[in-house]
Image: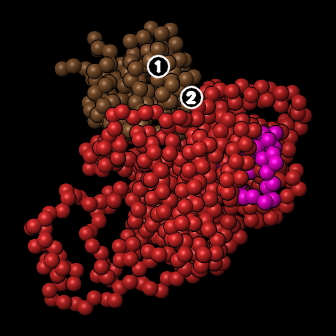
Chain colours: A brown, B red
Amino acid sequence: MSQKIRVVIAKPGLDGHDRGAKVIARALRDAGMEVIYTGLRQTPEMIVSAALQEDADVIGLSILSGAHMHICPRIMELLKAKGLDDVQVVIGGIIPDVDVPKLNGMGIHGIFLPGTPMQHIVDYIAANARARV
Amino acid sequence: MKSVADPAGTRKQRWEREVVEPALGKSPERKGPFTTISGRLIERLYTADDLGGLDDTNHPGEFPYLRGIHPTGYRGKLWTMRQFAGFGTPEETNQRYQELIAAGGTGLSVAFDLPTLMGRDPDHELCLGEVGKCGVSIMSLADMERLFDGISLADITTSMTINSPAPMIFAMYLVVAEQQGADWRTISGTIQNDILKEFIAQKEYIFPPRPSMRLITDIFAFCAKEVPRWNTISVSGYHIREAGSTALQELAFTLRDGLEYVQYGVDAGLDVDDFVPRMSFFFNSHSDFFEEIAKYRAARKLWAEAMKNRFGARNPRSWALRFHTQTAGVSLTAQQPYNNVVRTALQALAAVLGGTNSLHTNSLDEALALPTKETATIALRTQQIIAHESGVTNVVDPLGGSYFIEKLTQDMIDGTLKYWETIDGMGGMVAAIERGYPQKELAEASYQFQQAVERKEKIVVGVNDFIQADEKPIEILYIDDTAAGVQLKRLAELKQARDNGRVRRALAALQEVARGRGNTMVPLLECVRAYATVGEMCDALREVWGEYEEVPVI
């Protein structure tokens, strides 16, 4: 039997609108993944350290406040520094079109905008999470 | 209008049997279940039989105000068209306010950025990328002076969406009013100041529930004496609904929050009729047209009866529930955004038919960004078209007497009373929040709704049906980091220029009062006059009361 995919769902920054993060956390859990929800107001350092501790395959960020262009580069940098380059980072929230190529450039390809079906996110993560050894 | 007992059942039952059933044989109904957006099952027809005698004793302007708090409805005064706005620096937002006033807006509504809402100065590590993004950045009195430059606070009413740091921001507003020579006894406006819904839904809390409740009762007491026309709280269902509640949960939890505030006020030694008349409410207007209208009607009756019977209020102004409405941001789609104008118009119409006292209509780009000047104008025009062209303002409560609306209204009342019983049984709303009860209810309802959308039991046009592949992106307001740079520089300059000894003394005095029982508004006014920052004032109280951390419920 294959091991479960481990996903850390995180809310970085000051925003408290956690409806999306929680609905996705539950959908991933219902899809058979191991989900760790960090709760609110996480710094990039806290998120990366949670990913390390939890041996996460995927970090799912929920950002609606417009702070993604500050938070994402920092998280990618920290992951690299900790040797966690193979952890897949995905993001859901309000992301202006102009920022999408920039996020892709950092290595973030799973970008889920408002209205994305939950199943689509589940499938994406299942297909792209790092292989468990 | 009681139906006569008939061995063959009610007239409606006979109609179901003799008329509907044969018709269904020929042409069946669409696939059900027929439910509201909240999942409430709706029958195909409502008649007098559903009401068990229509109560025709409710009239507008009379207890319990089911049909409205003003006897003349909108024939006297239209609702206040109050568009929520704020972004970037105080100067940029001031510019937008001047434009809204010029376009015929009749009240201001301030959106603050996340650092301000969370009581953090822009140099705090959690403020990375957040300064001026979701609202205007206000760090100290100096920013408040800039925000209202050229706007006479004696002549306009201002609503400020601020909760945990409400006393600090309100104190700043009062000092600006004072500088302009406006009389505290005649200025008016609203602070949201509703912490319970933050714990339940929006999660912009700082201090634990009990000291947070004290800050609120301090404002009740302060305003009753010093700023008698100020609306001291806007008990909000908007965020509860946006976080995924049903219409009934929004109604039940919001009003129960209201009862909690009244109880805390009474326990703090205030007379109900001294502070309840200045309490106001804030509801969502979601997409299910009739359910929303029923919700507003039910709210008025429930509140009036609770104030009179539960708290013994004697002043009719304590009984009359006044509310602001905002159309449902969460219902708007990033896909085919022009469709959002239509959604918003329908939601705004529901709010008006429900008798709202003030209204914000969302802009078509709500799911993408803060509104541009153009989209904000269309949103305001939507209200003006309803007010001046549709004719719905000619008559009070036009849907009163509709079997369906009256039945839904009664169902909302019954359902709310049931929720209240549960929450009362837990020892009140603060206790219910501490055990995660409303949070769990919301998490469940929002997941159910999302699943209904996934299964296409609920259609969202442009999202899970009627999808358009070749969509062209629309132009949005992109907020860069210029404001953050400006505000960070100003913060450093402020700390150089002000009398830091005075700031330290004022903050120490604040802590002293926070440890004791005095009214926190008094030392806060001195902190503000000394140009202490929002972050410094909140930190001073964090040291005394600690910070709240929730146990997340999924």
Q: State the image coordinates of residue B63 (x, y, percent, origin top left).
A: 56, 80
Q: State the image coordinates of residue B129 (x, y, percent, origin top left).
A: 61, 27
Left or right of B405 on screen, residue B497: right
Residue under the image location 52 percent in, 82 percent down: B59
Could you tell me the amino acid type at mark 1? Pro
Residue B422 visible in the current orientation: no
The residue singled out by tag 2 in the image is A67
Q: Quadrant of residue B488?
A: top right
Residue under the image location 22 percent in, 90 percent down: B5
Q: Nearer the viewer, residue A96 or B286?
A: A96
Q: Nearer the viewer, residue B315 or A97?
A: A97
Judge whether A50 appears above or below B369 on screen. above
Residue B15 visible in the current orientation: yes
Q: Secondary structure under badge 2?
A: loop
Specify few, some or many for label 2: CA neighbours under 10 Å numbering under 14, 14-19, or 20 or more: many
Residue under the image location 70 percent in, 41 percent down: B93
Q: Is B402 part of what is drawn in magenta?
A: no
**Label 1 to label 2: alpha-carbon separation:** 16 Å
Q: Which residues are magenta?
A: B142-171
Query: Of the numbered discs in the image, which one, if any, rests on residue B42?
Result: none
Could you tell me the amino acid type at mark 2? Ala
Q: Quadrant of residue B21?
A: bottom left
Which chain's residue wears label 2? A
Q: Which mark sits nearer the N-terminus, 1 or 2?
A: 2
Judge whether A62 appears above or below B191 on screen. above
Judge whether B456 appears above or below B415 on screen. above
Which chain's residue wears label 1? A
Q: Please check whether the numbered discs 1 and 2 fall on a single chain.
A: yes
The residue singled out by tag 1 in the image is A101
Viewer-nearest of discs 1 and 2: 1
